[in-house]
Amino acid sequence: MTEQSAAAWPGVLRAVADSDAAGVRALIGGCFAEYDGCVLDPDGIDAWMATPASSYAGKGGQFWVLSVPGGATLAACVGWAPEADGRAELKNLYVRASARRRGLGRRLVQLVEEAARGYGADTVLLWSDTRFLDAHRLYEDLGYQRTGQRALYDPSNSIEYGFAKALPPVPPPG
């Protein structure tokens, strides 16, 4: 993927590198800190953050980070991975509090949808912690439907809502 801007954000959107591990942990950890009892689990469910590029490549997926202008600090991130049934799963959409309400989350979801469509997926699914109400509104505004609920039994005692969206077919060339 080539470097590009997201929405009107002056930072740079690029594929993650394993060397971004500390920045990814700081970004996601900062987002988790906004919610009581929501913590990173670096030796468990969040172990992928130690090598984000390798972890996503190993799943056949992609992960992007958006930098804060003029620095190494990350403003946002998102990834996706293919599912065995041909669908795609949107994963780890996080936007730093100071970068919210600028259309970044919307653009990053659209980036995943474009990548999923290129992969041949007809549906994008995702799971989102029940505490992340703003994220749920974004997904619903983008046409995602709530599909269920699951418990993760992780250190945060996470319960997540499932969401899914059928992607429009790619129009034939010509």
Image: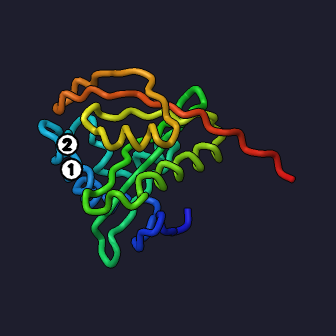
Q: Residue at x 25, y 57 (%)?
A: 97
Of all residues, the one furthest to the left in this rendering is: 36
Left or right, 87 with respect to 160, comes to right
Estimate how packed mark 1 is, as few (under 14), some (14 to 19) or many (20 or more) residues with alpha carbons within 10 Å: some
Left or right, 10 with respect to 68, comes to right
Residue contact at pointers 2 and 1, CB within 8 angstroms: yes
Vertical side of 76 occupied by 81: above or below: above
Residue 100 quadrant: bottom left
Q: Residue at x 45, y 65 (%)?
A: 13
Quadrant the N terminus occupies: bottom right
**Marker disc for residue 40:** 2
Residue 23 quadrant: bottom left
x and y percent of residue 48 in the render?
A: 32, 44
Left or right, 61 with respect to 45, comes to right
x and y percent of residue 3 in the render?
A: 51, 69
The alpha-carbon separation of the residues under discs 2 and 1 comes to 6 Å
